[in-house]
Amino acid sequence: MSERTREPGRTAVDRERRSSGQPVKKKRPPQSQGSGTAAKKKRPASAGNKKKPAAKRAAASSRKKARMADDRIRRTSERIGREEDERMSSRDKERARRRQERLRRVRRQKMIMAASVTVIVLCLLTILIIFLSPAKSIVSLSKGDKYAGNEEYDKALEAYQEALEINEKSVRAYRGAAGCYRMKGQIEEAEQILYTGWEKTKDEGILGYYNKLLINEAVEDINAGNCTQTTMDKLNQVLMNDPQNQDALSLRDICKERLSPGEAQ
């Protein structure tokens, strides 16, 4: 083998191994201490090294997009929450308004029911008074008539007074009480009860009874020769109540004739 075909940096052993077909171990050329650092710095970047900054940028962009998406979701959630709170507040106000309206309706219904019950009770009481009062008055009148028939005039007067307390316009009670007073000789009390009955009832029968008592008293005074101004007053009272009463007119003329000159009017 010529020297031109010799490969530089190959030893004789390497050449023998190569010629015999054995693998030859490559040797690196010796490098100085400073040249290694410089070589490392000047070594061109591999494809893997070029991909690393791009991956970092993509990751940073993804994180940024994720944060932006989270912010949008958070803002949307807050806005939805505010809107829901407003809707809930409106619903609560509407519920409160409807509840107050229901309470007012219930109160009105209760007031109407209470007023209706009160009216019904008053009507029932009025009906009871209307129907029961005459019944009680009739019972008292019956008792008075019974006592008067038995000449128990005091008990009869009490019964007639009970009837008048129930019904102050009971003509029967006024006439019965006047009869009891007359039978007891209490003519003035009889006249008074009859006059009161006339004022309360305006009953012509009571007025006629009253006038009759006055005329009877005048007759007694004239027959006893005791015709005084009091007798004339009784007859004048009868004529005031009944101007056409012939008995009163006749007796007044007689009484005038018998009055003393000093008492005549």
Image: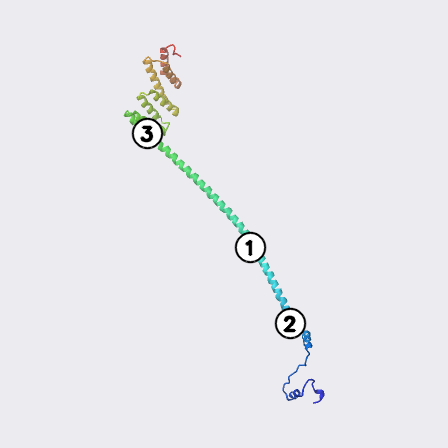
Mark 3 secondary-structure assignment: helix
Q: Quadrant of the C terminus?
A: top left
Residue positioned most to the right:
4
Tag shown at residue 81: 1
Tag shown at residue 49: 2
Dots 3, 2 in contact, CB < 8 A: no
Q: CA distance from mark 3 to mark 1?
A: 85 Å
Place residue 13 in its image quadrant: bottom right
Residue 60 spot, x, y in % from top left:
62, 65
- Amino acid type, label 1: Gly
Place residue 227 in its image quadrant: top left
- Amino acid type, label 2: Asn
Mark 2 secondary-structure assignment: helix
Which-is-in-front pick, marks 1 and 2? Answer: 2
**Colour setup of the view:** rainbow
Residue positioned most to the top:
261
Residue positioned most to the left:
150
Which-is-in-front pick, marks 3 and 1? Answer: 1
Mark 1 secondary-structure assignment: helix
Query: Where does label 3 land, which residue?
Result: 140
Dots 1, 2 in contact, CB < 8 A: no
Residue 76 spot, x, y in % from top left:
58, 57
Q: Identify the mark nearer the N-term, 1 or 2.
A: 2
